[in-house]
Amino acid sequence: MDALDDAELLRAYAAGDLRAFEALYARHKGPLFRYLLRQVRQPALAEDLFQEVWSRVIGARDRYQARAKFQTYLFTIAHHCCVDHWRRSSARGGDAFDSGPIHDDLLPAPAQDGPERRHGNDELRSKLRNALDLLPREQRDVFLLYEESGLSLEQIAAVTGVGMETAKSRLRYAVGKLRATLESTHAEHAT
């Protein structure tokens, strides 16, 4: 199954091969869940959206046509699920974005990120989360798609439904704002 690309796996799954879906799921579950969790900041809600994304993939398996990379297709669905959540939440008068804590233990870390490095990294993660909170939603979305999915700017533009230059600009502004916020925080602690 590892030799098959994503489109082939989805076609095999549509033909009844459950192992093909399991391979596809295993490839994309980590980045997809991290993207959703970092967008909505609530583990239970991220899990609900995660399930909704995969349900939509399963529901559309017979209609899927490989016009773009499967990953672009998957993150487009995820992006739309987040937008739908924010719209529903706004319509109910709720807070569409909860800036509460992210439970980093739900986000698998690389093997080299052992306990001895966690303490120093916890402070940096907290600063980054706070800096992400300050970004406008459109910039945060493009940044998270770029960081979590590995999609190109062209693919991110397709996912978010904006032009390539707009996606590029949003990413550039997001990175600039994150850098400025983190540098000012670092400068405050250095004095």
Image: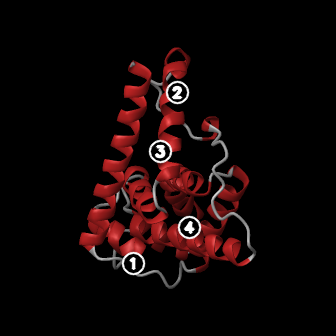
First in sequence, mark 4 or 1: give its number. 4
Instruction: Give the image location of residue 43, x and y in percent.
Output: 69, 50
Q: Which residue is mark 2?
A: 123
- The crowding category of the residue bearing disc 4, from other C-alpha atoms within 10 Å (few below 14, some 14 to 19, many at least 20), is few
Instruction: Give the image location of residue 165, x and y in percent.
Output: 24, 71
Q: Which residue is mark 3?
A: 131
Q: Which mark is residue 17?
A: 4
- The crowding category of the residue bearing disc 3, from other C-alpha atoms within 10 Å (few below 14, some 14 to 19, many at least 20), is some
First in sequence, mark 2 or 1: give its number. 2
Q: Amino acid at mark 4?
A: Asp
Residue lying farthest to the top in this orientation = 116
Instruction: Give the image location of residue 52, x and y in percent.
Output: 65, 69
Quadrant in the picture for the C terminus: top left
Which residue shows up at 67% across the image and 73% down it?
Answer: 90
Q: Is residue 53 above or below residue 134?
A: below
Q: Nearer the viewer, mark 4 or mark 1?
A: 1
Q: Amino acid at mark 1?
A: Gly
Which residue shows up at 63% across the image and 59% down it?
Answer: 97
First in sequence, mark 4 or 3: give its number. 4
SS at mark 2 in the image: helix
Q: Nearer the viewer, residue 26 or 31?
A: 31
Left or right for 57, reference 182 = right
Residue lying farthest to the front in this orientation = 191
Q: Which mark is residue 161?
A: 1
